[in-house]
Image (cartoon, rainbow, N blue to C red):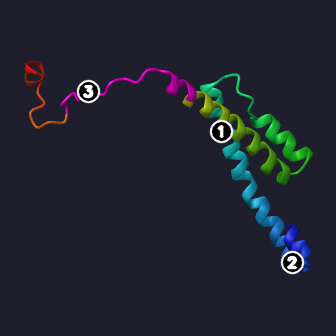
């Protein structure tokens, strides 16, 4: 929008830019809430943003700010959860991978017991 205004497009171009932006904001807000639900299912104390803050921010500020600020907050929280998970996986002892021969041609239970 800033580029459109800076290039001094005619009035129809600015309207088209605003409508295109408003068309793309609802899916961003929907996926923001999906990230919130996923993060909360993993960590109930995750500092993410759900439906109420999304709606309040969209109506109080504008859809543009809520489409930028709230997804960023949820993505930072999701990144913290992923870093904590990676650290816990790295700290746990590795499980030895042993083949179980389940995909062999003779994968019957009797053949498995003989091994």
Q: At numbered mark 1, what does the secondary structure look like: helix, strand or loop?
A: helix
The disc, 3 or 1, on the residue closer to the chain's N-terminal end is 1
Using a 10 Å C-alpha cutoff, classify the residue at mark 3 as few (fewer than 14 neighbours), some (14 to 19) or many (20 or more).
few
| Front residue of 58 and 65 | 65
Q: At numbered mark 2, what does the secondary structure look like: helix, strand or loop?
A: helix
Q: Left or right of 85: which side holds 56?
A: right
Q: Residue at x 55, y 24 (%)?
A: 88
The disc, 2 or 3, on the residue closer to the chain's N-terminal end is 2
- Residue 9 location (% of width, % of height): 88, 79
Q: At numbered mark 3, what does the secondary structure look like: helix, strand or loop?
A: loop
- Residues in magenta, as a range: 87-102
The residue tagged 3 is 98
Task: Give the CA separation, mark 3 to mark 1.
Answer: 36 Å
The residue tagged 2 is 12
Using a 10 Å C-alpha cutoff, classify the residue at mark 1 as few (fewer than 14 neighbours), some (14 to 19) or many (20 or more).
many
| Front residue of 46 and 23 | 46
Looking at the rendered image, the disc whose residue lies closer to the viewer, 3 or 1, is 3
Task: Give the CA separation, mark 2 to mark 3.
Answer: 66 Å
Q: Residue at x 10, y 37 (%)?
A: 105
Dividing the picture into quarters, in which one does residue 43 lie?
Answer: top right
All told, the count of numbered labels is 3
The residue tagged 1 is 35
Q: Is residue 95 magenta?
A: yes
């Amino acid at each position: 929008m800033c580029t459109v205004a800076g290039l001094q497009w005619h009035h129809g171009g600015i309207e088209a830019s605003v409508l295109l932006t408003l068309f793309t904001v609802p899916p961003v807000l929907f996926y923001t809430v999906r990230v919130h639900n996923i993060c909360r299912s993993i960590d109930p104390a995750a500092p993410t943003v759900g439906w109420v803050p999304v709606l309040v921010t969209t109506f109080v500020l504008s859809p543009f700010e809520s489409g930028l600020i709230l997804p960023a907050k949820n993505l930072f929280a999701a990144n913290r959860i992923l870093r904590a998970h990676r650290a816990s996986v790295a700290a746990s002892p590795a499980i030895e991978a042993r083949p179980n021969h389940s995909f062999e041609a003779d994968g019957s239970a009797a053949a498995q017991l003989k091994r």
